[in-house]
Amino acid sequence: MAGMAKGYNLSFDYVLYEMSYSNIIMYSSVLPSYDSDSDNDKKNNEIIDADDPANKEKIKRLLDN
């Protein structure tokens, strides 16, 4: 709630008493999030751009496994 109130410059009272739950979910879904470098080291994930034709074989291997 605090992040949404800060992100959209809304008062806490407005968020708590005037907004519907559906609107809170939709507003919150577009707020940016922060991923720390330490989280990325633990996951060791590779980001593959599926729109790039050069990654065709990587996508095929990913889906076949």
Image: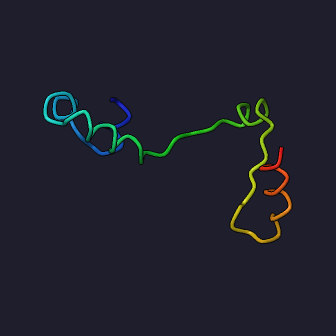
**Residue ID at (83%, 43%):** 65
**Residue ID at (16%, 29%):** 13
In the rendered structure, the answer to whether residue 18 lies left or right of residue 55 reads left
- Tell me which colouring the rendered structure shows: rainbow
Q: Residue furthest left?
A: 18
**Residue ID at (26%, 38%):** 22
Q: Give the quadrant of the N terminus.
A: top left
In the rendered structure, the answer to whether residue 22 lies left or right of residue 34 reads left
Above or below, 18 against 8 in this view is: above
In the rendered structure, the answer to whether residue 57 lies left or right of residue 4 reads right
Number of marks in the image?
0
User: Where is residue 52 shown, x and y percent of the image?
Assistant: 74, 69
Above or below, 28 against 58 in this view is: above
User: Where is residue 33 shown, x and y percent of the image?
Assistant: 52, 41
Question: Which of 60 and 43 lies nearest the eye of the viewer?
Answer: 60
Task: State which quadrant residue 16 falls in.
Answer: top left
Q: Residue furthest bottom?
A: 53
**Residue ID at (48%, 46%):** 32
Above or below, 12 against 34 in this view is: above
Question: Which of 15 and 25 lies nearest the eye of the viewer?
Answer: 25
In the rendered structure, the answer to whether residue 34 lies left or right of residue 9 reads right
User: Where is residue 10 shown, x and y percent of the image?
Assistant: 23, 40
